[in-house]
Amino acid sequence: MAQMTGNEQFQRWLAQVNQECGSFAARPLEGEFFGHLETGYTRALKLSTVTSANVNLYRTKNEIKNHSDSWFYTVFQLEGLATIEQNNRQTVIQPGDITLVDASRPCSLVWQQPSRQISLLLPRSLLEQQLRVGEAHCVQRLSKNLPMVQMSHRLLQESMSNHELSGSESEAALEAIVCLLRPVLQQQDVQPSRRDRQFEKVIQLIESHLQSEMLRPEWLANETGMSVRSLYRMFADKGLVVAQYIKNRRLDLCARELRSAADDEKLAGIGFSWGFTDHSHFSTAFRQRFGISPGEYRKRHR
């Protein structure tokens, strides 16, 4: 059987998302796409586990009108980072965080690195019984450090692993999750925190200067008005190392170029164009990230 191409894998994944999660559109991002979807229905608990990388999944008014909008997507982040936008608000969630996405409004989810999350369908009627939900409650980052958020994660995963739940028990679990999240949603500031806005600014600055020799932690700190120590701490809070993040983004873009590079194009030149001035260092770093050398990677993607 012939192996599926990257585009075929992408289209198959998107079709599965549309079948199980509602109508969405998507576009692959720079780097190698990966997407996997697992669905689970434990009586009243309707959920999907999405594992993906280098893809933008989104809903416009066209997708919304073709599918029911009578729920919220309750996103439980498990691994990696996800950037979510709705109502002109953007947030970056990390493992342990939760956020709400309104199915009745356009939204966008971006995964630029391997990410895994559970999307639980929360009926609008159930949420509105306990909370007057509006735009201000959507795409808030409900921090993993909050006890009610931690309890919600545990309750969901324990419910998922218990296949003997009755219908009434699964409904009670769903209601309990809403009860746990209610005080958190009521207390959260409707605007992203200053620290979150600063982190997003740093990420955008990195993306726009990936080919620049001056892109170093010291330069980033100076450009964003913080100390290098504060910059390191900000990335550590997200489970990241700033220099490693920059290197991985550059390697991802090197890999993208290798997939279309001519056989006679020098590998060192590709690495150099993305900030790797030493070919030996480039080759070692590439192998650490992708498991094979740049030359082998190019051959495999012919």
Image (spheres, rainbow, N blue to C red):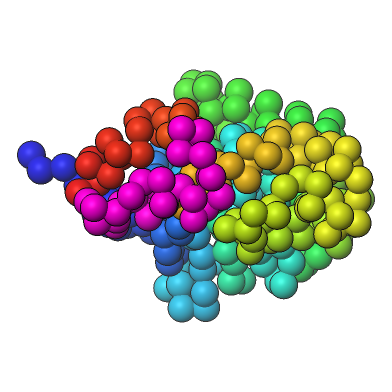
Question: Could you tell me which residue is drawn at 51 percent across and 65 percent down?
Answer: 58
Q: In this view, does 55 lie to the left or right of 84?
A: left
Instruction: Please tell me whether residue 123 belongs to the stretch shown in magenta.
Output: no
Q: How far from the left and from the top, in percent, is residue 6?
A: 28, 51
Q: In this view, does 131 lie to the left or right of 75?
A: right
**Relative to the observer, which residue lies in front, 157 or 233?**
233
Q: Give the range drawn in magenta.
A: 255-282
- Does residue 79 appear in this view? yes
Q: How far from the left and from the top, in percent, is residue 252?
A: 47, 47
Question: Could you tell me which residue is drawn at 63 percent across and 64 percent down?
Answer: 208
Q: Quadrant of residue 209?
A: bottom right
- Does residue 124 appear in this view? no
**Relative to the observer, which residue lies in front, 104 or 279?**
279
Instruction: Please tell me whether residue 264 belongs to the stretch shown in magenta.
Output: yes
In this rendering, is residue 265 above or below 231? below
Question: Could you tell me which residue is drawn at 46 percent across and 78 percent down?
Answer: 62
Q: How far from the left and from the top, in percent, is residue 67?
A: 45, 68
Which quadrant of the figure contains the N terminus? top left
